[in-house]
Amino acid sequence: MLEIDFAALLGKLDVVLLSTIRAVLTFAAGLLFAWAGSRVVRRSLVSGPASPYSVLVQRAVFWGLIFLGTTSALSQLGFDLSVLVGAAGVLTVAIGFASQTSASNVVSGLFLLAERPFVEGDTIRIGQTTGVVLTVDLLSVKLRTFDNLFVRVPNETVMKSEITNLSRFPIRRADLPIRVAYGTDLDTLRDVLIATADADPLVLDEPRPVVLFQGYGENGVEVQFSAWAVRERFLEMRGTLWSVTQEKLADAGIEIAVPHRKIIGPVRPTPGVH
Amino acid sequence: MSSPEPHDAAAWWNPSPLQANAARLYALGPLSVWLARRPEQLWVASRSTGTTADEGMGSVSAGPVEPPEGFVLQRFAVDETANPRLVPRHADRPVVARPEVPIALAPGQTLTAYSSAPVWVSVEMGCVLTEIPVLRPSDTWFGTTTDGTLCYAVKTHLRTDLEGVLVRAHRAITPVELHNKGDDLLRIDRIRLPAPTLAIYADDDGYLWSSGVRMTRTEGQENARVEVMDGPPAASPDAWLVSEPRLARDHENPVVRVFNSVFA
């Protein structure tokens, strides 16, 4: 005759029920912490330098806490999760190999965040590309070029490249190389160029415009004419100053040197020789 | 803003009603301004020769019905109950005054000098409609190439006596007190005047004055304590207020860089 130990059965049922209730409560607590924690993290990041990543971090925190809550609940139910550790190790290696480039971009992005060679709104040049920084994201930097093209530059490329930030400092200098004919009075040239710069309201009085002697070129004397302007009006100044400079040089009778060749040969052609 | 008392009817900053469909021409040194009332509109035209030619006291006369040739025209829809007027104002940025001949102050010495700068002409009719510089100074940078302030540049004689100062209808004279409390010579190649924090006063002689400025070098080479004096300058105590400063003074940070000098 089958005898059932109801007391023991009830005892075990109690344990299972208790464990189930504990597991459900643990999972529910995990859900609650995940929801609350992710919102707190997002709020704290929204206005800081890491604001572009706030949504990403929020999701990472949310799912991370869900995972913790789930594993805790499963362990409450008596599941042995150690087998997952081994599988996770293998999975990590596989993911690591597959995502080397992305991981490198992510790490580069973090370094860019810390170093801040540029921020959103800056005008930068990376390689041959010049544009305004739209966003600095986890994997890449997005630029808008001046002809309104969208350029995505991976963070790894940014980290390995020379970056020129054209809008970091408040003033910029424009350099115009000028080649004048040999025989030109350099003092007169300097006076004309400086007077031209002084007459332009966009050229800053200080730092003073300068005329630098660069050397004796193949076709003429080479000088560099440099003038400063505020960053916001730099292009405007460069456009107007260079065109006015040409007029003033012409007015002063200063010849811009052009390539020329002197051919030395016989005065009279020899008959029969071409 | 306080209403000025009409001491000199010819002074261009004194308010004077402009009848409907009438026009007025102001000659203010290099700048000429033409105002005309139209139905529900005010027309403003201006032209600047861009030179530093002195024109003395300036003149105000009835103007042609149409804008003079070569003038840049602006039109404004306005409240017809108000009267148009021109108000002199200081520059909207600090002004770097460069003495034509630099001067050096020995340790412990004090110097009071006068620097004049062209004013901005504010056309007002119930509100500020437009501002036109009498002579737009060139831009200049005060500071290092990586950090500094955008200013205007003016050349000044930085005279120490008023006898040598020319009366100009379009320039405001700023009395500057310089104190060198350092231990070495303070050579002054240029000084930065806080123009937006200066008020403008006018006197019976037709001078335009600005608030006095006291600069005290206490330590280092280029930092100084800057104080803007309240009220009309001591050189013209009866002058009356014509225009308020553009900006409130920064009482919290009176020590700023105002000198750009070199050790002798």
Image: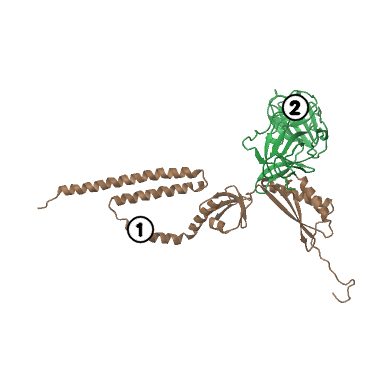
| Chain containing the residue with disc 2 | B
**A126 relative position to B156: left or right:** left
Callout 2 touching callout 1 (CB < 8 Å):
no
Q: What colour-coding does the image apply?
A: by chain
Residue at image point 36% right, 45% down: A31
Tell me the crowding category of disc 1: few under 14, some 14 to 19, or many 20 or more residues within 10 angstroms, Cα based: few
Where does residue A11 sit, x and y in percent of width and height? Answer: 19, 47
Q: What residue type is disc 2 on?
A: Pro
**A256 relative position to A62: left or right:** right
| Chain containing the residue with disc 1 | A
Give the chain letter for brown.
Answer: A
Foreground of the two, A237 or B240: B240
Q: Residue furthest bottom?
A: A272
The quadrant holding residue B162 is top right
Q: For numbered disc 2, what is the local secondary structure? A: loop
Return the residue at label 1.
A85
Q: For numbered disc 1, what is the local secondary structure? A: helix
Q: CA distance from mark 2 to mark 1?
A: 88 Å
Q: What residue type is disc 1 on?
A: Val
Can I make out residue B71 in this image? no
Where does residue A173 sit, x and y in percent of width and height? Answer: 70, 51
Query: Which numbered circle lies on residue B237?
Result: 2
Foreground of the two, B244 or A35: B244
Where does residue A105 sit, x and y in percent of width and height? Answer: 51, 56
Foreground of the two, B174 or A192: B174
Give the chain letter for green.
Answer: B
